[in-house]
């Protein structure tokens, strides 16, 4: 290999890649969440009977007191923008045009929430405290992923 | 009664934006040689244990801890790696000594960021694979979310974050270890292209290469060594929830709790009065303000005012990041905390040259393991 190189800089480095593939097990609570999204177009939460805290995404256990939580229950996919950002760069650092709005949405009636895109709204019209709801893909197109939610949009 | 523990030797491999001429092993060797000369130790004879910090994905090698002993003089000796920040490793070294198991321990951390071709993809791999990563967003979107909430909750302003950038880039102009020193105006920072609003391009610390090695020793052997000791009198670390729904948006709880541990250990009750200066995490501009408040160096919501009043300038009552911080020096991955400690050690020894502060006895270094973590470390260092 070295003999073929004409640029002396080329012997200074050796390129390498790591092929990385996994399947991530969703688990009992995670599957309940993804099934709610895929099959019923809603989210799911689980409650700690001792702390009375509703986890969303649901957990099998309470991270505050370590008790086992109750069975996950369905929760409507709507809530409030707790914070948001307008992203001007994609994962490779290239300009994003148009920019993408991401928000952490605190889901109503729970202590939990999720980060997702905001849509059907201009960046200038988004504010902390904005009420939003999920826009789901058509049932036939859902695969059991957070991407079954296209984005969240302002309520009404 | 456990022994007191001191840092008796420090060394670094030059901080650069890129290091095409040296392998990471050669960088580590360079830093180690300087640290051992400073401490007056022979690694093959005097050192009882070696502790490195590294993360396999940044290194591009699985089980990277196998690749560290020889360039430190640690082959066939007790060696282990902490997958954490350099301050985690210093705390381990101090505890190893206080158990009596070791008298002299070497700590190492480095960044060879310029070798990484897809850093944002690796960074993205740190995000929750089921609930977050599928969005495919640039990892810094999380910083934009954090910053917006922090400003909303604390009342600090976007302009005050820009002042952090101006201060740290200006400070870096005088620091020979800093890569990104520059004269920037408030308008430059505020007018820079938006990145992840309210975060702009200049609010983000840029990566750098560099390595740091420190020799840590028990009080009983300090007098036999050449290096001027700086005492480790307190440390703490803490990790919050990985889940974005469980973390407290707008407050660096991990830093507050890590500091509480360190303050208790060092007997610090009023950090602003009991400490003289600090090197704290500023990997994004807002983080310096958020961390100042979490470290109880001011009241919640007052970090920006402290900055505006000049209190945290090198000439102020409580200088913060006189080195230029990560914004000015460059972000050094797992070695970032060790860089901060290095700056504190030089200040306490009176060896900081053009950035030397007058009459400093006690300093703090704090690190955050960057996005998407809620992990922070705090260490207290003293002259006598
Ligand atoms: Zn509970």
Image (cartoon, coloured by chain):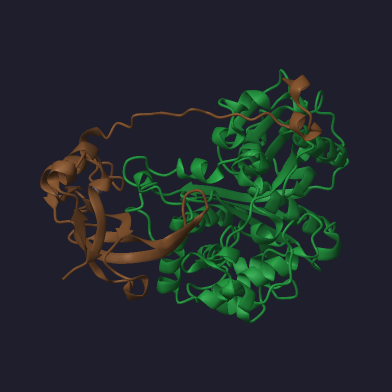
Residue A147, can we see it? yes
Q: Give the side of residue B356 with respect to residue A30, left or right.
A: right
Relative depth, front residue between B352 and B64: B64
Tell me the quarter of the image containing the C terminus of chain B.
bottom right
Chain letter for green, please: B
Relative depth, front residue between A87 and B252: A87
Instruction: Name above or below for residue B82 compared with residue A2.
Output: below
- Please identify the residue farthest to the top as the structure is shown: B76
The mark tally for this picture is 0
Relative depth, front residue between B365 and A57: A57
**In the rendering, at what x and y percent does residue B65 appear?**
62, 27
Place residue B350 in its image quadrant. bottom right
- Please identify the residue farthest to the bottom as the structure is shown: B309
Q: Give the side of residue A37 with respect to residue B153, left or right.
A: left
Tell me the quarter of the image containing the N terminus of chain B.
top right
What's the residue at 78%, 65% (across, down)?
Answer: B173
What's the residue at 84%, 48% (across, down)?
Answer: B228
Place residue B41 in its image quadrant. top right
Chain letter for brown, please: A
Q: Give the side of residue B11 with respect to residue A60, left or right.
A: right
**In the rendering, at what x and y percent does residue B330 appear?**
68, 54
What's the residue at 51%, 66% (across, down)?
Answer: B199
**In the rendering, at what x and y percent does residue B20 appear?**
76, 39
Relative depth, front residue between A153 and B50: A153
């Amino acid at each position: 290999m070295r003999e073929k190189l004409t640029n002396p800089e080329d012997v200074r480095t050796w390129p390498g890649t790591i092929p990385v593939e996994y399947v991530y097990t969703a688990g009992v609570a995670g599957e309940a969440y993804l099934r709610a999204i895929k099959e019923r177009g809603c989210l799911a939460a689980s409650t700690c009977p001792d702390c009375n805290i509703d986890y969303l995404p649901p957990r099998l256990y309470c991270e505050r007191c370590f008790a086992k939580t109750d069975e996950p229950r369905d929760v409507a996919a709507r809530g409030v923008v707790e914070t948001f950002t307008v992203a001007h760069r994609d994962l490779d650092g290239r300009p994003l045009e148009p920019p993408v709005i991401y928000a952490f949405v605190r889901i109503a009636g729970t202590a939990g929430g999720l980060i997702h895109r905001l849509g059907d709204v201009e960046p200038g019209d988004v504010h902390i405290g904005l009420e939003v709801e999920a826009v789901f893909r058509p049932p036939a197109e859902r695969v059991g992923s957070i991407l079954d939610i296209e984005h969240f949009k302002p309520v009404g | 009664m456990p022994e007191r523990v001191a840092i008796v030797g420090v060394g670094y491999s030059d901080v650069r934006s890129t290091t095409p001429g040296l392998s990471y092993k050669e960088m580590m060797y360079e830093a180690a040689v300087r640290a051992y000369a400073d401490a007056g130790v022979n690694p093959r004879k005097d050192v009882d244990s070696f502790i490195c910090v590294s993360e396999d994905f940044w290194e591009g090698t699985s089980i990277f801890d196998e690749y560290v002993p020889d360039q430190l003089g640690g082959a066939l000796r007790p060696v282990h790696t902490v997958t954490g920040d350099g301050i985690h490793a210093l705390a381990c070294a101090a505890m190893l000594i206080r158990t009596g198991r070791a008298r002299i321990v070497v700590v190492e951390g480095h960044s060879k960021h310029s070798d990484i071709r897809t850093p944002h993809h690796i960074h993205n791999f740190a995000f929750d694979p089921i609930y977050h990563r599928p969005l495919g967003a640039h990892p810094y979107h999380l910083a934009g979310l954090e910053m917006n909430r922090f400003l909303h909750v604390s009342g600090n302003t976007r302009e005050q974050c820009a002042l952090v950038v101006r201060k740290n880039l200006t400070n870096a102009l005088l620091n020979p270890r800093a890569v990104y020193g520059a004269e920037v105006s408030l308008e430059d920072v505020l007018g820079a292209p938006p990145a992840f609003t309210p975060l702009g391009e200049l609010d983000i610390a840029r990566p750098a290469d560099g390595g740091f090695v420190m020799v840590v020793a028990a009080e009983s052997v300090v007098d036999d060594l050449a290096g001027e000791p700086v005492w480790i009198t307190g440390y703490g670390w803490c990790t919050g929830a990985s889940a974005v729904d469980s973390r407290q948006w707008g407050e660096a709880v991990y830093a507050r709790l890590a500091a509480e541990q360190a303050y208790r250990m060092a007997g610090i009750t009023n950090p602003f009065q009991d400490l003289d200066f600090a090197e704290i995490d500023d990997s994004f501009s807002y983080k310096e303000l958020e961390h100042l408040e979490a470290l109880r160096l001011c009241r919640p919501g007052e970090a920006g005012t402290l900055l505006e009043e000049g209190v945290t300038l090198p000439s102020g009552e409580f200088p913060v990041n006189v080195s230029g911080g990560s914004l000015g020096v460059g972000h050094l991955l797992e070695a970032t905390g060790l860089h901060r400690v290095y700056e504190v050690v030089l200040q306490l020894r009176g060896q900081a040259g053009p950035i030397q502060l007058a009459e400093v006895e006690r300093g703090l270094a704090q690190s955050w393991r960057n996005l998407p973590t809620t992990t922070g470390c705090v260490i207290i260092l003293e002259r006598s």
